[in-house]
Image (cartoon, rainbow, N blue to C red):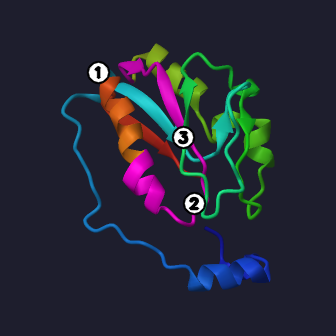
Amino acid sequence: MGDLSEFPLRYKLFLKVYQWRRIDPVPWTPLKKRVRECNIALVSSAGFVTPGQKAFDDAIRGGDPSFRDIPSEVDVSTLVESHRSEIFDHSGMRQDPNLAFPIDRLKELNRSGAIGSVNRRHLSFMGSITAPGRLAKRTAPQAVQRLVDDRVDAVILVPV
C-alpha cells in the first residue's frame, strides 16, 4: 500500500477509520514435498473473469466475496479485469495480465522442471473487499475445498 499522503481525501478518511483485521497466528503449512514435485495453483485478487463468465458485482456493499474458476489453458490476453478499486492504476495488469495472474510464468516453471505441475484451474477473487466476513465464512472454505479436491500442494497468492 502506498503512503497515505498519496490518496485522495475520501480514501484517507476511509483508511484511517477502517477496522483492520489481524490474523494471529498466521496459518501456515510447510510443504511436505519438493516444489519440483508439487501441483501449483494461482489465487489472484485481480478480479479477472474469462469471456462469458459473470463479472464481479461491484454493487455488493463491502465487496463481492465470490470467486471465479480460471482454467489453466486460458489465454491471459482474453481475461477481463473487473477490479472495483479506483485507488490504483489498472493499466499495467490490463496491458499484461500476467502481472496479476502469472499463468504463463507458471507454465514456464513447469516446462523447466522447477515445479511439478500446473493445476487444471485457478481462482480469481475480487480485491478490495472491505467487509470480509462473508468471504471468510462462506467463500474461502468453498475455494479451499476446490483446491483440496484438485490435490493442489501449494498456491501462489497474487494480491492486487
Mark 3 — residue? Answer: 67
The residue shown at (71%, 77%) is 11
In 3D space, how far apart are the residues under numbered discs 3 and 2 (Cα atoms)? 12 Å
The residue shown at (43%, 22%) is 119
Q: Is residue 98 or residue 74 the one in the foreground?
A: 74
- For label 1, the SS is helix
Counting from the top left corner in percent of width and height, residue 132 is at 49, 61
Rendered view: 28 above or below 49: below
At label 2, the amino acid type is: Ile
At label 1, the amino acid type is: Glu
In 3D space, how far apart are the residues under numbered discs 2 and 1 (Cα atoms)? 34 Å
**Mark carried by residue 37:** 1
| Most distant residue in the left direction | 32
Q: Earlier in the sequence, mark 3 or mark 2?
A: 3
Q: Quadrant of residue 73?
A: top right
At label 3, the amino acid type is: Phe
Q: Quadrant of residue 146?
A: top left
Q: Is residue 113 or residue 80 the one in the foreground?
A: 80
The residue shown at (35%, 19%) is 116
Q: Quadrant of residue 88?
A: bottom right
Q: Is residue 96 or residue 141 the one in the foreground?
A: 141
- For label 3, the SS is strand
The crowding category of the residue bearing disc 1, from other C-alpha atoms within 10 Å (few below 14, some 14 to 19, many at least 20), is: some
